[in-house]
Amino acid sequence: MLSGDFKTNDMCWTWIVVAAVVAWLVWKLFVDKNVGVVEPFGTGRSRNNKIQYIFSPSCPHCVEFRPTWTSVTAKVATKYPDAQILSTNVDDEDTADLLPPDYPGYIPVVYINGVEYKGPRTVPAILAEVNRAFSTKA
């Protein structure tokens, strides 16, 4: 110890521990659980389950698929409450950073854990793929 004043050193370590605990709590409450946090692809959050729908409100295929997506998200949110569910409008410049790096440029597109879903556009088929993808995550 650099000084003989043990109360000062103990107080310093107490504040360091308090700051570490507060930082950990903030991480657990607001970042780790995705409460109000939307992060772009490629940010290293691979351990969290994510499903994303990329659409345009002016696309007739997207409009037709919207009720299916609504059903899927309701069921995913119930079964996987910590899953990140994104609906990304390609016409909105503010959401450009939410597009996956391999986004093919056509719509509507569904990504499950960063992988483009290419199966049937039905609720049971999408949910089956979500369950498979979410259960095999490490």
Image (cartoon, rainbow, N blue to C red):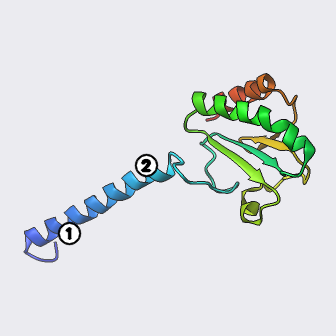
Residues at marks 2 and 1, CA–CA distance in whole angstroms: 26 Å
Q: Residues within 10 Å of mark 1 (few under 14, many from 20)?
A: few
Q: Residues within 10 Å of mark 2 (few under 14, many from 20)?
A: few
From the top left corner, tell me how far across and down residue 13 is, in percent. Answer: 21, 64
Q: Nearer the viewer, residue 133 or 81?
A: 81
Residue 54 in picture, x, y percent from top left: 80, 48
Tell me which residue sits at (12%, 77%) in the image. Answer: 3
Which quadrant, please, contains the N terminus?
A: bottom left
Residue 82 picture location, percent across and down: 55, 38
Relative to 40, 102 lies left or right: right
Helix, strand or loop at label 2? It is helix
Label 2 sits on residue? 29
- Type of amino acid at the residue the image marks with label 1: Cys
Left or right relative to 100: residue 131: left
Give SS at disc 1. helix
Quarter the C terminus occupies: top right
**Lower sequence index among marks 2 and 1:** 1
Q: For the residues carrying marks 2 and 1, which lies nearer the camera in this image? A: 2
Q: What amino acid is labelled 2 in the image? A: Leu
Q: In this rendering, would 6 be left or right of 47?
A: left
- As rendered, which of 75 and 82 lies closer to the eye? 75
Q: Which mark is residue 12?
A: 1
Name the residue: 68% across, 57% down: 40
